[in-house]
Image (cartoon, rainbow, N blue to C red):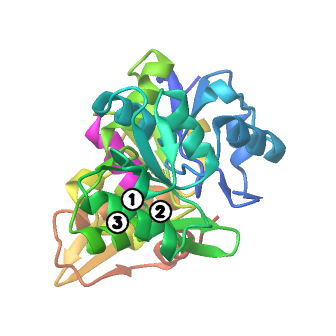
């Protein structure tokens, strides 16, 4: 029996937004793709807005098999970082939800919402309620010398309606206002994935996600294999222009690739540089065509466009530009 892509790994470290769901909508095929194995699954999310229990409930409501202990959040990683830098009982100004404040409280620190409480640190996570007055309190504290920890710096958040501003957009506002840089807990920084690896008890894990700049770069940061699925933020064009730190081990148009054989050799596609064009020809799976094209594109950063040489190549290009 041919081994599936997932089979060599002890666990899957799964991103959520854009990989398994978009807001309240399941990514098509995601539930079925994960239902065929007892392999350990950890849900590793940069989104710090909800508690692990709430995330697990949301996953369960959507049809995924998830327990609270399977969820690893950037709010947990951020709280751990704060505890490593501060003394027990120190005040931490919260920019984010009550779930983030609960994680800070759980490590023995004191949440506050006011810069007048002289917090020793500011922790920032995604919240739809964050407004000017909340950012102003954080700016006052950071400019007064408070340590600044960001749960993540994702600039966008996939929703059922499209891409909304993510925590990174609010981090950018504070960065400009304070001329400071935060310590980052979430992907692509190492703390969140290191927490997931500790929870898993193995480093033989596959990171699965939809973003080159967080999921894939994070996997490369901690030296783990990765699978990019084109169901969320990153596109085929993003992949073709990816920097070395953002290049995945595997690529797929959907999560079902986990249950298919891994790329083990020639794909049936041929790509060559013709002037400034990448000419694609051959036949086979569309994701294999994209990966073959990417491997050539990464060596020719100045290419102008991908030029399909036949109808099979044209169909592959259409498929890899169509989100599941």
Q: Going by the picture, which residue comes out furthest to the front? A: 116
Residue 244 at x, y percent in the picture: 21, 54
Q: Are marks 1 and 2 in contact (CB under 8 Å)?
A: yes
Q: Secondary structure at mark 3?
A: helix
Q: Quadrant of the N terminus?
A: top right
The residue closer to the viewer here, 37 or 280, is: 37
Q: Residue at x 36, y 50 (%)?
A: 118
Disc 3 from disc 1: Cα separation? 17 Å
For mark 3, what is the residue?
Answer: 139
The residue closer to the viewer here, 253 or 168, is: 168
Whether 162 is drawn above or below 268: the answer is: below
Looking at the image, can residue 268 be seen?
Answer: no
Q: Secondary structure at mark 1?
A: loop
Mark 2 or 3 closer to N-term? 3
Within 10 Å of disc 1 (Cα), the crowding (few <14, some 14-19, many 20+) is many
Q: Which mark is residue 76?
A: none
Magenta stretch bounds: 214-222
Whether 225 is drawn above or below 323: the answer is: above
Q: Secondary structure at mark 2?
A: helix
The residue closer to the viewer here, 50 or 123, is: 123
For mark 1, what is the residue?
Answer: 153
**Is residue 291 shown in magenta?**
no
Q: Which mark is residue 167?
A: 2
Looking at the image, can residue 187 be seen?
Answer: yes
């Amino acid at each position: 029996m041919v081994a599936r892509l997932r089979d060599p790994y002890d666990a899957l470290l799964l991103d959520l937004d854009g990989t398994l769901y978009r807001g309240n909508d399941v990514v098509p095929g995601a539930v079925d793709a994960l239902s065929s194995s007892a392999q350990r699954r950890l849900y590793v999310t940069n989104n710090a807005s909800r508690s692990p229990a709430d995330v697990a409930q949301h996953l369960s409501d959507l049809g995924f098999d998830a327990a609270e202990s399977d969820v690893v959040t950037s709010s947990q990683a951020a709280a751990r970082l704060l505890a490593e830098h501060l003394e027990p009982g120190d005040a931490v100004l919260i920019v984010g939800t009550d779930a983030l404040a609960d994680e800070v409280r759980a490590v023995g620190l004191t949440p506050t919402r006011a810069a007048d409480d002289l917090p020793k640190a500011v922790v920032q996570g995604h919240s739809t309620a964050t407004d000017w007055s909340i950012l102003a309190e954080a700016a006052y504290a950071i400019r007064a010398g408070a340590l600044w920890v960001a749960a993540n710096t994702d600039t966008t958040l996939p929703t059922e309606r499209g891409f909304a501003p993510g925590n990174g957009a609010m981090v950018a506002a504070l960065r400009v206002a304070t001329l400071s840089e935060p310590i980052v807990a979430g992907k692509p920084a190492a703390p969140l994935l290191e927490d997931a690896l500790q929870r898993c008890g193995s480093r033989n894990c596959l990171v699965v996600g939809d973003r080159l700049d967080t999921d894939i770069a994070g996997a490369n940061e901690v030296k783990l294999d990765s699978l990019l699925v084109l169901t969320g933020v990153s596109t085929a064009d993003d992949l073709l222009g990816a920097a070395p730190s953002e290049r995945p081990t595997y690529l797929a148009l959907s999560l079902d690739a986990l249950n298919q054989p891994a790329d083990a050799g020639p794909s049936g596609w041929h790509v060559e540089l013709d002037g400034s064009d990448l000419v694609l020809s051959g036949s086979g799976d569309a994701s294999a065509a994209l990966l073959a094209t990417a491997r050539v594109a990464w060596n020719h950063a100045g290419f102008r466009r991908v030029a399909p040489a036949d109808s099979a190549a044209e169909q592959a290009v259409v498929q890899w530009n169509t989100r599941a």
